[in-house]
Image (spheres, helix red, strand yellow):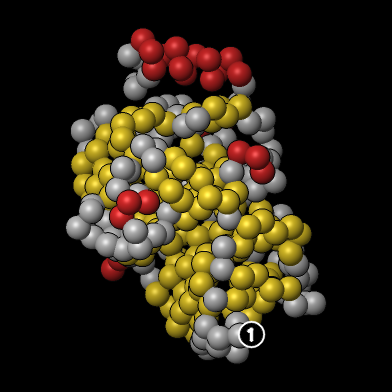
């Protein structure tokens, strides 16, 4: 079994998005296509409501999926399809924008602190104009597996033979939240050619052999291979493991819309101006 190693590391960058939300971006548009099929990963965790209370007022999306995973606090959402709800602590919202959706995501100021992540997943050309949809996953639906010092929440994909609750996805992704006890080891297996990354948000994680350490706020893009070993050499650590099948198509990206060509982008924003964006 070929072991993966760290191909490249990135440190989160302070970024302002929405109506003035201060967040930390692990990777984004400048790293395309290195993380294909993933476009962006934001860590919007903060103990200061002033960092996030302005939220993300009404805005469009097309051609992607957004994955919101909350650990603390809650975000209220509404959309152009008439949906409304709350993504609370421990919950996941996997939103497929497809042909187009307009929505807003507003943190609840009474639920502090706010701890969570948003991942953007690209859609293949054949699926970019599919009907929009949501998969709202409650905490009780997410398997939590304890195995030899590793405590693993399986959001998508599988680990140790247990499947996550998010299904029918276009790039066969894996999304794990791992808490690893001090001096313990976590082993994860992948499809050889899937893009895979590790994002550490608490403690220090040692990855592969020779041991390379990631501190909180670092993301590692992994080499190809069938497996990865992650260690907790200096105390408990917590990290996300995300993997998926590369799409290998051109990316034309402007703001909240990601298509394959500039012409498709121009058409999307013309439809937005004309009021025909939502199908």
Q: Quadrant of residue 204?
A: bottom right
Q: Please state, as top left, top right, bottom left or bottom right, where the C terminus lies in the image.
A: top left
Q: Is residue 2 above or below residue 91?
A: below
Where is residue 200 drawn, in percent x and y? 56, 67
Q: Is residue 138 left or right of residue 11?
A: left
Q: Please state, as top left, top right, bottom left or bottom right, where the N terminus lies in the image.
A: bottom right
Q: Is residue 52 or residue 157 the one in the foreground?
A: 52
Q: Is residue 133 or residue 54 the one in the foreground?
A: 54
Give the residue at x 48% y 37%.
64
Q: Quadrant of residue 9?
A: bottom right
Where is residue 158 drawn, in percent x and y? 51, 66
Where is residue 35 drawn, in percent x and y? 65, 48
Q: Is residue 31 left or right of residue 12?
A: right
Q: Secondary structure at mark 1?
A: loop
Q: Is residue 216 left or right of residue 60?
A: right
Q: Is residue 102 above or below residue 203?
A: above
Give the residue at x 80% y 77%.
210
Whether residue 21 appears in this view of the structure is yes
Give the residue at x 31% y 31%.
58
Q: Is residue 69 above or below residue 258?
A: below
Where is residue 165 drawn, in percent x and y? 38, 60
Task: Please name the residue that numbered disc 1 is placed on.
Answer: 233
């Amino acid at each position: 079994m070929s072991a993966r190693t760290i191909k490249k590391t990135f440190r989160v960058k302070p970024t302002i998005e929405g109506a003035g939300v201060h967040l930390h971006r692990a990777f984004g548009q400048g790293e395309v296509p290195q993380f294909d099929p993933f476009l962006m990963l934001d860590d919007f965790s903060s103990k200061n409501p002033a960092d996030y209370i302005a939220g993300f007022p009404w805005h469009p999306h097309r051609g992607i999926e957004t994955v919101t995973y909350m650990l603390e606090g809650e975000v209220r959402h509404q959309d152009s399809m008439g949906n409304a709800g709350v993504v609370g602590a421990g919950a996941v919202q996997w939103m497929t924008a497809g042909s187009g959706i307009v929505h807003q995501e507003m943190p609840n100021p009474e639920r502090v602190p706010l701890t969570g992540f948003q991942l953007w997943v690209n859609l293949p050309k054949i699926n970019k104009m599919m009907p929009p949809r949501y998969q709202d996953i409650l905490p009780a639906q997410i398997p939590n597996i304890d195995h030899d010092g590793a405590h693993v929440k399986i959001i998508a994909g599988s680990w140790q033979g247990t499947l996550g609750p998010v299904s029918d996805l276009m790039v066969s992704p894996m999304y794990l939240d791992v808490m690893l006890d001090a001096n313990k080891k976590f082993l994860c297996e992948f499809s050889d050619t899937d893009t895979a990354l590790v994002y550490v948000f608490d403690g220090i994680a040692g990855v592969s052999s020779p041991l390379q350490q990631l501190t909180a706020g670092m993301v590692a893009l992994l080499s190809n291979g069938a497996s990865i070993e992650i260690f907790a050499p200096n105390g408990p650590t917590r990290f996300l493991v995300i993997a998926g099948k590369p799409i290998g198509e051109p990316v034309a990206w402007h703001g909240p819309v990601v298509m394959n060509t500039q012409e498709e982008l121009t058409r999307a924003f013309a439809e937005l101006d004309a009021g025909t964006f939502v199908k």
